[in-house]
Image (tube, rainbow, N blue to C red):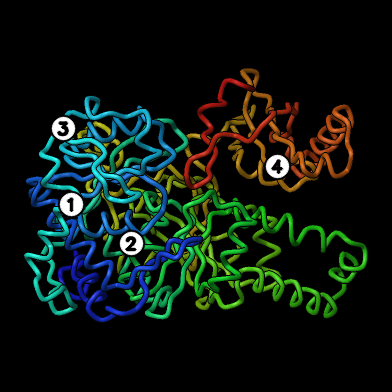
Amino acid sequence: MMHEEQYNFVKYFERSIKENWDRPAVTDYGTNVTLTYGQLAINIEKLHILFKECGIKKNDKIAVMGKNNSNWIAVYLATVTYGAVIVPILQDFRANDAIHIVNHSGSKLLFISDINWEGIDLDQIPKVLAAVSLNDWHPISLALDPTKINYESIAQRFKQKHPDGYWAKDVHFDERSNEEVGSINYTSGTTGFSKGVIMPLNGLAGNVRYAIEHNLVCPQSRQVAFLPMAHAYGCAFDFLACLAAGGHTYLIGRTPSPKILLKAFAETKPTVILSVPLILEKIYKKMIVPQIQKPPVSWVLKVPFLDEVVCAKIREELIQAFGGEFQQMIIGGAPLNPEVEAFLYRIKFPMSVGYGMTECAPLITFTPYAEGSKLYSCGRPLPGIMEVKILNPNEQGIGEVVVRGENTMLGYYKNPQATKEAFTEDGWLRTGDLGLVDADGFLFIKGRCKTMLLGPSGQNIYPEEIEAKINNMPYVLESLVLQQEDNRLVALICPDYNEVDADGLTPEQLVEQLEETRKQVNSELAAYEQISLVKLYPHEFEKTPKKSIKRFLYSNMA
């Protein structure tokens, strides 16, 4: 365990605030709101006063739910530096799910955006003393004396406590051991069952430590945070690591469409970019595919030496589209389409794929681009922080990935049975993923244990690999491969209607095109992996915040 003060999670932020007092910390992108580290510290101190007025004690739970904004970040940091436990709730959760999480966690305060408050009232969350708006700090609903915690009264108490102002020298957060619980993150996976991940401060510190020591973040960092802060991936690196290093985070509170993101990248010129595969794949499909399919370019790409000139040109255009100043792009949260990855690897685009899970806050494996990542791999285990091994590997070396180390959760909140099932008898955390580790220590993920299908003679079928091939075909936006009771495979396909409309396809022609897609994909598959039928699905599949399809919702549609 990391006990040294330099790795203490709370002290990371105390040091960063003092050292970067006048530097910009967070910007609500699209507004004129930018907080310096000093201004963020003042908001944290005011929240500490509010917590005290509400009678919040050490280890009490405080929930936060809303879009990415500077107030969300202030609540998170104020909670962990006060000695309480933060409970981030994804803004996409429905009201009844949010109510369950607040009640299950026993949260005493709820900070929530006005739009997320719709459908909730204080009677449904009886343990909550107050609900406070993330929009402007006004009390939304109270079981307390409203004169004690409104904005004006807190500002007055702040002035009484700090009559000469609040400065860097005044910042002092109470010591907290890294072994204490820092957060409870409720998962939103593809299985439909949400569990509260108990994460010690040590796990949060492990991710921050890795990012700083491997130069993923630094005082000059500029990052565009479009992944939800309530999700472990965005929280760890766009927020916690960036601010611990003294960097500047631009918070995107809107739906991160490629158009919005490319505009933000062009304006802010980030130094490092975190993304989920879906965003990169959409940009690849819109920007790169039309270029490389044109006859002159497609021909040149097949000619040795000449192809290097074209690849360099495409690489430079793509780098400029992302702002032109980033050192590397980090991809995580879901598998990256192999064809997209292979092409980006070919053109030497500065990108690395990592692997993690909420239960590890989240990072498990990663190899920075400069250190030589391998095609299709998720990098090596974080040195000195995480270990990985393959449980019960088959003849190809594929088995369940199990992990242990600094970033690992303590268990699932109020769920001893799920906690027991999550760990092996000797203490390794089961990831539920299938993978292999090569001779150089690189991890390769093959699929989910729960999604793996069995062929007619017991062969392992990984539907994600087949879906990746389908998704690269014309007129396909996304797909799901399911298995019927007779073991035949069916592909649900959501069409790319923009492409369909641009080419003027009739419904009958679209069906014909997708049948051609089925035949072409089957030509690249083994006999036991063949798609027997294609079914049209009218709209995008429902996804988790990290853009993985909620497969359980469609299991009976084969």
Give the amino acid type for the residue marked by disc 1 in the picture: Val
The spot of residue 519 in percent (x, y) is 83, 36
Q: Earlier in the sequence, mark 1 or mark 4?
A: 1
Give the amino acid type for the residue marked by disc 3 in the picture: Lys
Which residue is identified by label 3? Answer: 127
Between 185 and 533, the one nearer to me in the picture: 185
The spot of residue 213 in percent (x, y) is 35, 77
Question: Element under label 3?
Answer: loop
Which residue is located at x 21 percent, y 37 percent? 105
Which residue is identified by label 4? Answer: 477
Which residue is located at x 82 percent, y 63 percent? 291
358 sits left or right of 280 in the view: left
Which residue is identified by label 1? Answer: 181
Q: Residues within 10 Å of mark 2 (few under 14, many from 20)?
A: some
Quadrant in which residue 219 is drawn = bottom left
Which residue is located at x 35 percent, y 30 percent? 97
- Disc number lying in front (4 or 2): 4
Q: Earlier in the sequence, mark 4 or mark 2?
A: 2
Q: Can the viewer see residue 383 in this picture?
A: no
Tag 3 near tag 2, CB within 8 Å: no
Q: Is residue 16 above or below residue 397?
A: below
Q: CA distance from mark 3 to mark 2?
A: 37 Å
Which residue is identified by label 2? Answer: 386
Q: Is residue 335 above or below residue 100?
A: below
- Disc number lying in front (3 or 4): 3
